[in-house]
Image (tube, rainbow, N blue to C red):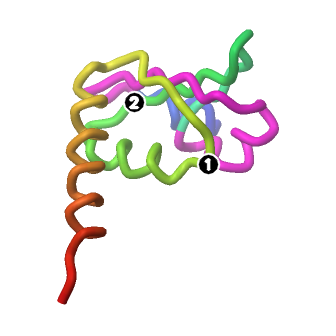
Amino acid sequence: MTRSIALTPAGWLVDVLLETTLEEAQHMVPPALATLEQAPNGVVLRCYTNNLDWIAHLLAGLDCPLVIRQPAELREALQRLAERISEMAGRIE
């Protein structure tokens, strides 16, 4: 059931390689959010979303290196998030 929720089609198919173990990925990613599949060089996270900015926030919070395989627009969303975080970190009152 949770696998079918994670794979319910939406606007974007997200495919990300998490450079971690399957056990660690399972602790970080709820099963209803995405599927996780062991790969030779890490764990493949797949899900659908209508909001790439939200997925960028989720990915930024994971405690592992990652590679965005698709969509390319998710790289742009993650870059925008990084810029916003950098601006916040540099603010002084």
Q: Which mark is residue 81?
A: none
Counting other residues with Cα less than 10 Å from the Cα at mark 2, is it few (<14), some (14-19), or many (20 or more)? many
Q: Is residue 21 above or below residue 2?
A: above
Q: Which residue appears farthest toward the top when viewing the image?
A: 40
Left or right of 11 on screen, residue 19: right
Where is residue 9? Give x, y as percent.
37, 25
Asked whether 77 or 32 is in front, the reply is 77
> Residue drawn 20% across and 45% down?
80
> Residue drawn 32% across and 49% down?
54
Residue ID for mark 1: 63
Where is residue 41? Give x, y as percent.
69, 14
Quarter holding the N terminus is top right
Q: Which residue appears farthest toward the right when viewing the image?
A: 23
Q: Which secondary structure lies at badge 2?
A: strand
> Residue drawn 76% across and 42% down?
24
Which contiguous range is marked in magenta? 9-33
